[in-house]
Every structure is written in C-alpha cells, then in structure tokens.
Amino acid sequence: MKTGGWSGTGGVDETAPIVWVAGGVEAGEPAAEQGVIAKARAFAQPMLEGERFDTGEDALAHADGVAAILAAIGAAPSLRAAAYLVYAGDYLTRPEDVIGKAFGAGYAGLVEHTRKLVQIQRSARGALADSPVDAAQQAEQIERVRKMLLAFSRDLRVVLLRLASRLQTLRFYAATKTPCPRVLAQESMQVFAPLANRLGIWAIKWEIEDLAFRFLEPEQYKRIAGLLDEKRIERERVVETARQRLAEALRQAGLRAEVQGRPKHLYSIWKKMRGKQLDFQRVLDVRALRVIVDSVPDCYAALSRAHELWRALPEEFDDYIAKPKPNGYQSLHTVVLDEHERPIEIQIRTRAMHEHAESGVAAHWAYKEAGAKGYAGVSAAGDFDARVAEARKAVLRQLLAWERELAEPEGGAGGLGQGLFDDRIYVFTPQAAVIELPAGATPIDFAYVLHTDLGHRCRGARVDGAMVPLNTPLKSGQTVEITSIKEGGPSLDWLNAELGYLKSPRSKAKVRAWFNALAQQQTIARGREAVEKLLQREGKTAIKLDELAAQLGFRSADALFEVVGKDEYSLKPIEQLLRPAGPALDADELLVQKLQRGPSEAARGKGGVLVVGVDSLLTSLARCCKPAPPDAIAGYVTRGKGVAVHRASCSSFRQIAGRHPERVITVEWGTPRAAGKGEGALYPVDVAVEASDRHGLLRDISEVFAKEKMNVVGVHTQSVRGTAWMTFTVEIADSARLASVLAIVKQVSGVRNARRR
C-alpha cells in the first residue's frame, strides 16, 4: 500500500484524465469485506440514483468516485462502504437509527460524525469567504479551520472521507469543464491540501493542489503545462525507467536500497518558480528519485553509483548529512542528466533520516506550507519549534494502516482513535467565524475572546440554539451565541475555580482587572469625598479640582483623590495651599536664627527626635506617614507649629519640600533611654491588610498583634464584594520588628496581603 507522493502513482495530467496506477484494492481481499461494500451500495442506490448535489454532481456517481479514491489509497472496505451510507443519510429521516439497525452502531456513528463535519466545513467555507483582507488574520483563520477539521472528530476516518469527497468534486469540475466556484477551489488549496499533507496522504494532496491551481490560476496553469514538452504519462515513464535502472545498479553493487520516483506536479513547479524566482529551465527536480538505504556509508556508495550511471551537475550537489540543515534535516541531494540531457534530482538518505524528515523535527510540511517563499528555508528559531510540536500531533505515520486497525474485525466501522489537539477546541460565532479556545472553555471564555466588554456583560449563552448554563464546557464544532446586558460587570463567582465558570487564564485576568478597577474607583470616591469636605470647610468650593491637583504636583484630580483615599496623602498640604500666607510670625524669625546654630546637647539628651542645629524646638511626627525608628526621616519647618518629622519616602513630604526646599531640615532619631531608666517611646504606625472576608477575621488578626505584644490603638475596616480592607494603627518602639509581625499576619487564613502604609 502506497501513501506517499513518491510512489509514482497517477495524478492530474495537462490533457489526459486522472488515472490511478498503483495502491488500489489489494489482491485476494476477503469476500466478506467485498460484500459489505456491495451491501452498502445496494442500500444507498435507490436513494442516490437520479439525485444531484448543489455542485451539479450525480449523487451515486459521486459516492462511487469517493469509494474508488479510498480504494486507490488502500482504505479498509468498511470505510469505502461508509462512503455510500454517508450520502444516503441525507435522504433518511433518522439516518443514525436506520443505518445502525442495518449495518451496526459503528457505521451509524461514522455516518453521524461525517455528516456533522460536512455541516461544520460548509460553515467554515463561509468564514473563509468572509475572511479579513489582512493576510495575517486570514492565515490565522485558515489555520484554525485546518485544526478544527482534525479536532472535530476523534475518528480520523471522517477526515479521510471528506478529503476523498473533495477530490472527487474537483475531478468532476475538471472532467465536465464546469467552472469551479472560486471559494471552493480556495478552500481546497488552503485547507484540504495542507490537511492531506499533514496526514501524510501525499497522492491526494498533490492532486487537490493541481486541480485547485487549475481553477484559481488558469493562465498560469496553462503556461506551466505548455512549458512541459512531455505529457505527465510520458514523464512518469521516464521516471520509472530511471528508477528501475538505478535500483538494478544498486542491487548489482550489493546495496540493499528502496528506490522511489515521481514526476513533480504542476502546482509544485509553479510555486518553486515563483518562490525562488526561477525560469522553468532552472527547475531541475521536475523528475526526482529518492533512495533509502541502511547506513550512512551506503548513502555515499549509492551516490557514487548514481554518478557512474549519469553525468552529475557539481553545482547542484548538497551534502546535508555532513552539514545538516538548521532544522536537523539530513540527506544527500544531487542532480544528474540522463542520456537525453533531462535533469533528474536524486535524494539519498538512511531509513532513520527518512523517518526524521517525514515526521520529525524537519517535517516536510514545515517548509512546504510556508508559502511561495517557503522554499528559501526554515530557521530552527522563531515559530518553527511551535510548528514542529504541532506537526508531531498532526502527522500520523501509516495513517491508513492505523485506519484498518480501527475497523471492527467483523467488518464493522470500528472504534474511535485518539483525538488530535485535545488541548484546544474550535467553535463558531453565529457569523461562522472560527474561534480557538482551550479545552474545557465555557461561554464566558468565548465572550471574552470576542471582546472584553462583552465578557463583562455576559449573562447567558445559547449553544447550537439551546440555552445553557454559563459554566457549560464547550465542544468543538458548536455554534455559540452570547446574551448580554447593556451595562454591568462580572461576578466574583466567576473567579471561584470550583464553580468552573472560567478556563482561560486570559479571561480570569480580565475579570480580576475589572474588580481591581472597581476597588480603585471606590478609593477615588473616598478621596474625592474627603477633599470636597475640606473645600467646604475652607469655603473654597468654587476651585477647580484639576487645577488644585496640578498645584499639588498631581497629573489629575483622580490621582490626588486616589492617594488621599488610600490614606497615603495628608490633607494638610491642601489646607496650606488654600489658606493665604499671613504675615511672618515672630516664631519663624526665631526659628531661622536657631537653624544657623550648631548642635545642642539639650536636643540630644531628651530621647526621641534630634533636630540638628536647633535647641528646645517643638517637633511632631507627621500623621500622613507616621515615622518610627529606625525609619529614614526628614524635617519640614511649618509656620508656627515647629518641625514636622516625615519619613524620607513620604509622598506628602516630597510634594511640600519641592515647593519650599528652604524649609527642609536634617533630623535624626535621638539616643534611646538607657536600660532601667524607663521604657522607650512608642510610635503609632498604620498597617494595611487585604483579605477574603469571613467570620472571625478581625479577631484572628487582632490576636496576632496581642500575642506579639503590639498595642492596637485604632482599626478601620471595609468589605466590598467579599474582600475586606483593614487598617490597624499599632504602637511600636522599632519599625524593624514590624516586618516579622506582618509575616505572621499573612499566615492568617484568608489574608492575601499585609503591609505598612
């Protein structure tokens, strides 16, 4: 049984009809297997005879053609019988039940899956016809359709039936000289031919390509056909003669070798001429041979023998064994001229190299499907590794042999094979666009792929026309329609993994972002309320908020409200900005004089804060940042209220210091009290805790502070949609110890984060 394009089997000729020469029904096929085909045809004939498809084909003739193509590639009789039953199903009221009773459940399942795939594929054809003009988007859509065709059915015999059916339809258009619809030819070239290629069914692949090329580019097709001064049958005869001669020469040399041959088909010649910008005379592999031997030394021995038979072109020799291609491909390539000066390309490789080239890292399709420029080569970098990983899933060696194993021993249609691309599913929008999702994805995941806002507003879904819960896992081939509200947002339940509303990490991230934005809006609202109350007290309600924020150094009013709402910015700088500067106080004049003096022993000896160069100066700890030893600190000389001590990192301090740098003063912590002379000073600091709200949460966190001997002097809590935000004011002597206490707080059940404000 031959499945490769190197088998020398027939194909489309420029003038002659298609002739399949090899790979047909194997001799001595059991009578029982032949009988099931005859039974299926007899069953379908009354329904199909005289009927025509929308393509204009006679239904029974089409079924006969599909069965013949499947026989030519060596398909099992059960699959050839199913070709008749699939089309008969279109004329039955309950096809699965009728066929199941007459032929068995296996056949009924195969027919059902195939008929569904026909419907899906027709919808996908509409999606291709409406594909965006952008080439990258169109390529992505085509690739999704290819994957969908594989992923839809776990039984790949369904795909075989569709490939054979499409080839038969193209043959019909060619034989009857009926114009082929462009969208159908385009789909054949972009979806079906690459699909056949990935499955290793090269004979179907190149014939679909040639026929689609004929319909899509008729002028180019005629030009290439005219350049070939031989008919395809003649070229096949030349290749076969050369193949036999080389095989005999290798046998006489004592080399065990398999020699394959094929003439290059028209589409491949045109694509190579376009991709490499070659004249037809420079396409040297119109005729090609491949030699498969046992070992590397045998490769070079076979090369030597080939060069003895024919004259070699030295400039066309490539040793990819000694120097493999970047993708790992290995083989010897040479071009020779036969006795009539006709070029023949010869590839020589070991069996291991051949298997590697056909389905390994250097998978044949990885560069053949790269487009017109694909012949320029493929780098191992970039997206090639991803395509190779995909190829390992898609390319099934000995596919037809495996298909035989799937068949039931008694001639039934058999079980199901392992599905491809099990990690992805492919579903449709109501407009027939293909959407790729992770396996197990839900309608909400689908909505977020279409548009983030649609995901937020999603409230219901129809799958294949039926309403379903939003946590229903979708399956490949389904059509999904989203029901949404005009305004609204997601539910926190969607983030609960146990409820199964979301599968995609991207969807989960969008839901979290929505709730983070909601929390930010609430924080801004709290800050706005505080600022507006201050403006009312000061009688400044007419002031523009954006101008106020700009004067304070913020890019917008919302930026000011956010830090105020988080208690990260004091209202005092706003008060100072709103109140006009009065006459200079005597205390300020005295302060300026004191700033010029040297350090004072009095200031050092009182414990607490040392203000450098100032004696007996009033100091206070800023409420906006609440510094505590050993924080880095700085002082700001206020008007009439002494020195306010801030943490050096305090945003409020940086704002006011930027406007009045002359009032900044260096400060440092004083020497702690000696042991035995009384306890050191305690400093209030704020601790922010974010947690999942639950009963007893406040009690558990408070117990941690009590156990660690930290006095809690204030608590503020707020709960929004199941999330609790808490602010604890605790008294500490040393902020360095606070980090270890916060680490214990984070271990409390439900606590997500705990930090000092």
Image (cartoon, rainbow, N blue to C red):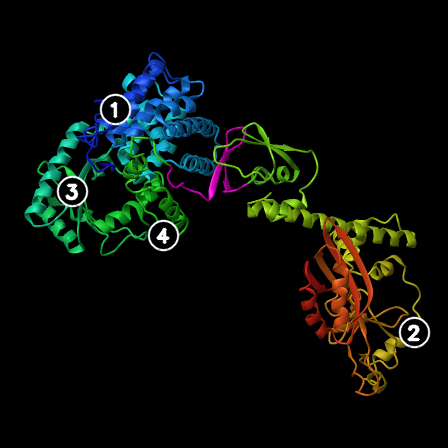
For residue 328: magenta?
no
Residue 719: x, y in percent?
76, 52
Q: Is mark 4 on a helix, strand or loop?
A: loop
What distance separates the C-alpha of mark 3 from that of mark 1? Answer: 36 Å
Q: Mark 3 points at which residue?
A: 259
Q: Mark 4 points at which residue?
A: 380
Looking at the picture, which amino acid does disc 3 mark? Val
Q: Specify which label sits upstream in the sequence, 3 or 1.
A: 1
What distance separates the C-alpha of mark 2 from that of mark 3? Answer: 106 Å
Residue 90: x, y in percent?
41, 19
Can you see residue 280? yes
Residue at 8% from the left image edge and 38% from the top image edge: 339
Looking at the picture, which amino acid does disc 4 mark? Ala
Q: Which of 34 and 284 is in front in this view?
A: 34
Can you see residue 651? no
Q: Specify which label sits upstream in the sequence, 4 or 3.
A: 3
Q: Name the residue under label 2.
A: 587
Q: In this view, does 602 lie above or below 187?
A: below
Q: What stretch is highlighted in magenta?
A: 416-441
For the residues bearing labels 2 and 3, Cβ distance under 8 angstroms: no
